[in-house]
Image (tube, grey):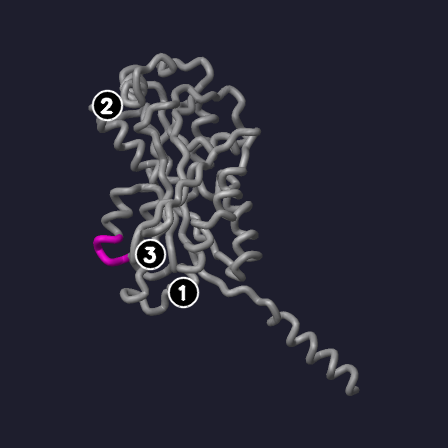
Amino acid sequence: MIRILAALAVALVLPTLGHAETMRMAATTSFQNSGLAETLLPEIEIDTGIEVELVVVGTGQALRLGEAGDVDAVLVHSRPDEEAFVEAGHATHRREIMYNDFIIVGPEEDPASVQGSASAADAMARIAETEAPFVSRGDDSGTHKAELALWNAAGVEPEGGWYRPVGAGMGAALNTAAGMGAYVLSDRASWLNFGNQEGMAVDYEGDPAMFNQYAYLPVNPQAHPSVKGDLAAQLEDWLVSERARTLIDSYRIMGEQVFFFNAEEEN
């Protein structure tokens, strides 16, 4: 009996040994769809003892979760919204971590001839002029916001049967575009990690306007006392470390580097 009780006591204690502390981070769908999250999160737990519970949503929804104090930090990619979020006191600060770029994906035959475009805005104007099908995220995400900025630069108000908002993440938008033979704005990493590329291609890339910066914003514990500010700070330290630089810069999809670490040390 004593041996059985002793074994039971060990069984009850063992799950608590080395148990990671948990924090919640709202992150963009591209962070997940690209596969980078699967690479970084296990290493974060090994190095810091922090288990990051990822809430995968678009940038707009991620910031709303932060504003409500429902997450401890956000990782998003829409600088004007991030700066407004900090200015409103919802985050203590904004820290740039890495970048990639947006691309216009579409049918290989390129019916709107965007491959010869002078700029991203020109490419969008050609799509609108020909009324070639275009799939929009339509979800207030960072990618959706970037798309709207490109339409604005093109002087186009997208509307009509050719314009198809799906209100979903990057993977769903790419799937819809592939099924319809439509154009779509995607981050490069999600496209390369997308498994249904048949008949589709990168039809436009390279405009500096398609630069895509990701930033980390710790939610303000003074505004939300339940927020785990200490864990958010530890995670930030890791995200700007040489260890993170190595993992982010070495991450490849089909042999191609898709994220570029650019965090700077604070003054």
Q: Quadrant of residue 252?
A: top right
- Earlier sequence position, callout 2 versus callout 1: 2
Q: Secondary structure at mark 3?
A: helix
As shown in the figure, which amino acid type bears the numbered disc 1? Asp
Classified by dominant secondary structure, the portion drawn in magenta counts as loop
Question: Start and end of the magenta stretch?
Answer: 86-90
- Earlier sequence position, callout 1 versus callout 3: 3
For the residues labelled 3 and 2, the Cα–Cα distance comes to 32 Å
Numbered circle sitting on residue 243: none
In front of the other: label 2 or label 1? 1
Numbered circle sitting on residue 230: 1
Q: Along the line of sight, which residue is nearer the eye, 202 or 159? A: 202
Residue drawn 20% across and 24% down? 155
User: In the picture shown, does residue 64 fall above or below 141?
Assistant: below
Q: Are marks 3 and 2 in contact (CB under 8 Å)?
A: no
Label 1, residues with CA under 10 Å away: few <14, some 14-19, many ≥20: few
Tell me where residue 191 appears, x and y as whole percent. Answer: 47, 30
- Look at mark 3 in the image and give the residue it sits on: 66
Q: Along the line of sight, which residue is nearer the eye, 51 or 260? A: 260
- Look at mark 2 in the image and give the residue it sits on: 154
As shown in the figure, which amino acid type bears the numbered disc 3? Gly
